[in-house]
Every structure is written in structure tokens, then in C-alpha cells.
Amino acid sequence: MRILVTGGAGYIGSHTLVELMARGHEVSVVDNHVNSSPVVLERVRELAGRPFESHVADVRDTGGLAAIARAFAPDAVIHFAGLKAVGESGERPVDYYDVNVGGTLSLLRAMEGAGCGRIIFSSSATVYGEPVYLPYDEDHPLAPVSVYGRTKLMAEQVLADWARAAPGTAAIVLRYFNPVGAHASGRIGEDPDGVPQNLMPYLAQVASGRRAALRILGDDYPTPDGTGVRDYIHVVDLARAHVAALDRAAVTAGAEVYNIGTGQGYSVKEMHAAFCRAVGRDLPFEIAPRRAGDIAEMRADCTRAARVLGWQARHGLSDMAQSLWNWQSRNPAGYRDRAEDPA
Ligand code: NAD
Ligand code: UFG
């Protein structure tokens, strides 16, 4: 298939490109590199062993996007492009709605012009909000607590209405749980700008000496060891879920939603211990206050993805930790030449 990939230079997008290329799909990437380096795409080309086109463009530029889509004539679009920092979303709500909701509308217009009616969308477990029950299934009530979460929910609603209105179109919404880890090659991985806001990238920078110690944000949650529990998923498994979603989009119509996780929850302390094992030494940590808006436990029911998409996660915790350390130790400064803000 011919796949237009927005945000393809990002963390999840780059890993998905590798899986798409390995299966013989033709891809075209659109990214404005607001949160990624163009170097990523060179590394993906190297891993794939063949070229693909890429465009530096903003998804909100409907005219530019429409021209790219018309020329490439995609069979489907995977829409990763978006802003994703939960804290920042509360400080810059207009930017977040503009990119995450406005960007999705702009993309749908561009797809219309190119006669493309299939889209896979990156949503998030954060649309569920405080759990009414666990694990979350796709019918769990939706009550996001952040601006970021609300932008994702709105984009989901836009896609559902779009797919309902135009016969034969398909929107597959993937609600990701917590992606971690990196490609086995160690050539691509997560490379946050500035101080990492997420657990595993932070821990990785503690191991490589850029940060002094992990701050465990709360050890008084109602969980077995008091620290927050999440459903971490290896990014390569997540990438494979997009391949399965494309196959599904080719044979279905309307909007469908799938949780993408492992179904297994691990605490912050368990993640810290697993990463210490991968690195081969103890990494310092301190207990700090809870982070506002954090939920004690999030875990996915992934039976729908297994049943309908034929997809399930293959990689366990040690693969997640080892692949992250492999990436971090080979690229201590990420895609840059050197770390700009050592601890
Ligand atoms: P990322 O920031 O690494 O990748 C997003 C990419 O989109 C970047 O390359 C960025 O430059 C690009 N982009 C941003 N705004 C753009 C715009 N206006 N026009 C064109 N390109 C633009 O993030 P990621 O972790 O790879 O996440 C991909 C998607 O998955 C996002 O939509 C994110 O909200 C969603 N998601 C991520 C997580 C997570 O924990 N990483 C969890 C749930 C959902
Ligand atoms: N944590 C720490 N120290 C840190 C960072 C995080 O102890 O320095 C803890 C958090 O309190 C939480 C756990 O580690 O208990 C995971 O936190 P992350 O920030 O890594 O992940 P979140 O679950 O908070 O959020 C992530 C993405 C969201 C997405 C959500 C989906 O950042 O965009 O997963 O589940 F919506």
C-alpha cells in the first residue's frame, strides 16, 4: 500500500516507518520537525535499505498538505503528528487544540482532495481519565483530565463523525498506553528535548550521566508498592499494531477504536529495578511528591485488538529495558552531536 505518514520523524512514527518498509509498503512522510530531527529519517532509510520521500511541512497547512497528498495518492494515512506534553498543554491550550484538532481537520480536507478515505489515528489512554474500573476497555467512560487528553478525544470525535458521513471511509483509532524502548539496532529511539517528562527517558538519562537521580513522583498511591502503575508497551510492538490497523482499514468501514498495550501493569519501582538490571548497576532515586493530575494505575484490556486486528504485544519488560539502554548508551546525546544540558 501507499501510506502517507504525518509525524513520521517522531518516536513512534520512526519505528512504524521501519515496520512499514519491511513489509513492502511505500511511504511518504510529512513532518515539520517541531519535535524531531531530520536525522531520524536518514537512519530509517538506512535501516530500511531503500529510499522514501519526505516533506518538511505543517499539517495545518492544508494547501501544502493537499498538494503532497494529491501527488503521492495514498491508499491510507497514519496520523502521528501532534503535540504531546501533558503539562505544556495546560499552558498553551490554543496551540494544542490548533495542532491536534485543527491539524486533524486539515488532514481530512487534504485526504478528500486526494480521494483517500482511510486513516489510522494516534490517540492515548489518557482519554479515559480516572478509572471507573480496571483494566480499561474501549467502552470505559471518557473523561480526560488534561487539555492534551481533551484534544485527543475531540480528534477522535471528529474522525468518528467523518467516517459516519462518508460511506466506505474508515478511521481506526489506536489508544496507546505507555510506549517505551527502542528498535533493536540502537539506531532509532526516543530523544526528548530538554528535561524528559516521562519516566523511562528520564531514567535512561540518569544511567548515561545526564541527570543525577530519578525522582519517583509519589510513593503513597493505593498500589502494591505505593508507586504509580502503568501498562508499558514496547515501541516496536506498538509500531506493528499500525501495520495490523492498516490491514483492518482496508477491509472495514466506519470508525473503530482499539486499546494498544500489553494488559500488564508495572510500578515505577518495578520499572526502575528492570532498568537497573539492563544497565547492570543500581541507579540513584529519591522519593518526591506526587505530580498533579497523575492517576494511580492505568492498565489496558487489549482483547479487542487481539480478536479483531490479530495483534498482540510480543516483547516483555526486559526487552523494553534492554532496548532502551542499547539506544541510550549508543546515542547518549540522542540525535544531537553532544548533550546540551548535562546534569
Ligand atoms: P513525537 O513528538 O516524537 O512525534 C510527533 C511528530 O509530529 C514529531 O516528529 C513532530 O515534529 C511532528 N509534528 C508535531 N506537530 C506537527 C505539525 N503541526 N505538523 C507536522 N508535524 C508535526 O511523539 P510520539 O511519542 O512519536 O507520538 C506520536 C503520536 O502519538 C502523537 O500524536 C502523540 O500525541 C501520540 N501518543 C504518544 C504517546 C507517548 O507516550 N509517546 C502516548 C499516547 C499517544
Ligand atoms: N514518574 C516518575 N518520575 C518521573 C516521571 C514519571 O516517578 O520523572 C512516574 C509517574 O508519576 C507515573 C509513571 O512514572 O506514575 C509514568 O509516568 P510517565 O510520565 O512516563 O507516563 P504517564 O502515564 O504519566 O503519561 C504517558 C504520556 C501521555 C499519555 C499517557 C498514556 O506522557 O502522553 O502516557 O497512558 F497520555
Image (tube, rainbow, N blue to C red):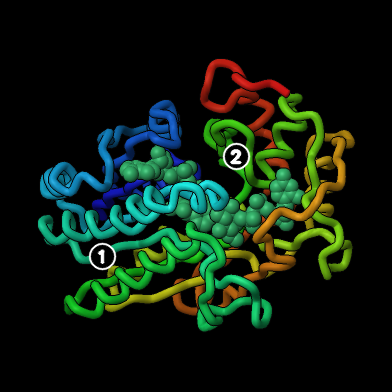
Say which element carries label 1: strand
Q: Quadrant of residue 294?
A: bottom right
Question: Is the CB of the residue bearing disc 2 within 8 angstroms of ligand 1?
Answer: no
How would you rate the neighbour count of disc 2 (Cα within 10 Å): few for under 14, some for 14-19, many for 20 or more? some
Q: Which mark is residue 118?
A: 1
Which residue lies at the image location 22% right of the left edge and 55% below the top edge? 106
Return the x and y of residue 160 as percentages of the image width and height.
31, 75
Q: Which mark is residue 237?
A: none
Residue type at mark 2: give it: Ala
Q: Quadrant of residue 97?
A: bottom left
Residue that mark 2 sits on = 184
Return the x and y of residue 321 as percentages of the image width and height.
72, 45
Q: Is residue 35 left or right of residue 318?
A: left
Q: Is residue 182 left or right of residue 296?
A: left
Q: Is residue 18 above or below residue 299?
A: above
Which residue lies at the image location 42% right of the left edge and 26% below the top edge? 39
Q: Is residue 29 above or below residue 111?
A: above
Which residue lies at the image location 64% right of the left edge and 73% below the top edge? 130
The CA distance from mark 1 to mark 2 is 30 Å
Return the x and y of residue 40 as percentages of the image width and height.
44, 31
How would you rate the neighbour count of disc 1 (Cα within 10 Å): few for under 14, some for 14-19, many for 20 or more? many
